[in-house]
Amino acid sequence: MVEFPISEPYRELIFTLELIIVFIFMEFSVFFFYKYWKNRKESKPSVIEFDWGIIFACFGIVIIFYILSDFYKVDRLIFPVCGYFTLAIGAIIFLFHIESIKILKTRFILTILLGIFTLVLLILFLISPSLVKAFAYSLVLFTMAIIVFYFIVIIRHIWNKYRIHSIGLLLGIVFGVLGFAGMSDLAVSLFNGFEIRIVGDILMLASLLCIGLFLTSIPSIAEIGWQGKIKYVIITTNNGINLYTENFQEKKEINEVLVAGALWGIQTFLANVLLDSNLKVLSKGTDIILMERGNQVTGIIIVEQELEILKLLLKKLVTQFEQFYANILESWKGDITIFKPTAYLINEIFSIKKV
């Protein structure tokens, strides 16, 4: 029969392992909050880094509640549930943001479902705390499933370029799920002993190592797959005269006349909005239009998702275009064929191929 609070011979070992786990979770949280703050100062914040700071902090808080409920004489019903509420709130924020920027194209369905789960848990907690525990496990499983699904989407984007990192992340996911399960009361009861909790702690540490190395050694997750989100690159004069256009999602079977007509419509629309020199981001239907005005030309990219890396590269394109064509732009007579070498400049800056 398993009894709480945890006593010797396992108390000191489990307590030490779980304090280390909390410390690592909080270290990663601080790392991502600092990264978000630093990037925000440089005007290139990524909300995903902010969200990861929240997620790591929430998991750390869950483990703190585990420690309090299992090592001290407190209410073992209320403390774990408080931890689950914390995790659910963090997951809702995280999920709302990744659905907002369409990393998961689920139209806020998952955010709504998780919100309903959390609300039901709160109502059950207020009506009858004894009913909460079983439902709380369902909430945690749902949250873990969302995070796993998110990572699988990311792995699909980076598998070719970051294969070793992807394998490490997959191992981290497996270790994390098994570790969190091994730390639960359900596992301790099923195995009738705290040995399984020690195994769970070790697996959780292995998971943090794998996932931490992955998250800190690749580019910002929000920026992964950005090349495939570009539709058009357009360069115009500051009064809206087209100098160069390239379509990066062009298919051979598409009628060239239709493509040209679509671009003409886009450019006509842009010529009207370019009068506002402060306008840099514009939504039109399902497209996001990013604009960067230089001294003589305006760079425009039409994309599926607003990303900071695309804004930075667009600014670089405008700067280098004006430098390369400085003499030509001063005396330009209207011949746009002069600007055909821009294709090489775009390829060098964006490093993408047509899809």
Image (cartoon, rainbow, N blue to C red):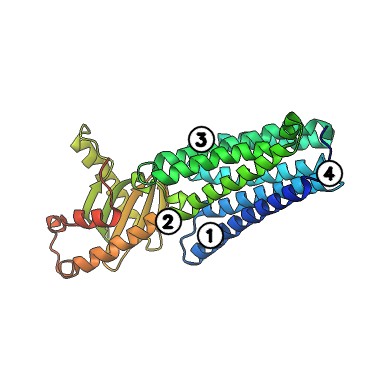
- Work out whether residue 238 can be spotted: no
Three-letter amino acid code at the position of disc 4: Pro
Helix, strand or loop at disc 2?
helix
Q: Which mark is residue 5?
A: 4
Disc 4/disc 3 C-alpha distance (Å): 43 Å
Of circles 4 and 3, which is in front?
4
Position of residue 142 measured from the top left corner of the image (x, y, whole percent): 62, 34
Helix, strand or loop at disc 4?
loop
Disc 2/disc 3 C-alpha distance (Å): 22 Å
Position of residue 308 measured from the top left corner of the image (x, y, whole percent): 42, 56
Three-letter amino acid code at the position of disc 1: Tyr
Return the residue at label 1.
36
Disc 1/disc 3 C-alpha distance (Å): 25 Å
Three-letter amino acid code at the position of disc 3: Thr
Q: Earlier in the sequence, mark 2 or mark 3?
A: 3
Taking the image as shown, residue 322 lies to the left or right of residue 51, namely left
Q: Residue at x 76, y 51 (%)?
A: 12
Return the residue at label 3.
106
Three-letter amino acid code at the position of disc 2: Glu
Of circles 4 and 2, which is in front?
4
Return the residue at label 2.
308
Q: Quadrant of residue 277?
A: bottom left
Helix, strand or loop at disc 1?
helix
The mark total stands at: 4
Q: Within 10 Å of the Cα at label 1, are there few (<14), some (14-19), or many (20+) other Cα atoms?
A: many
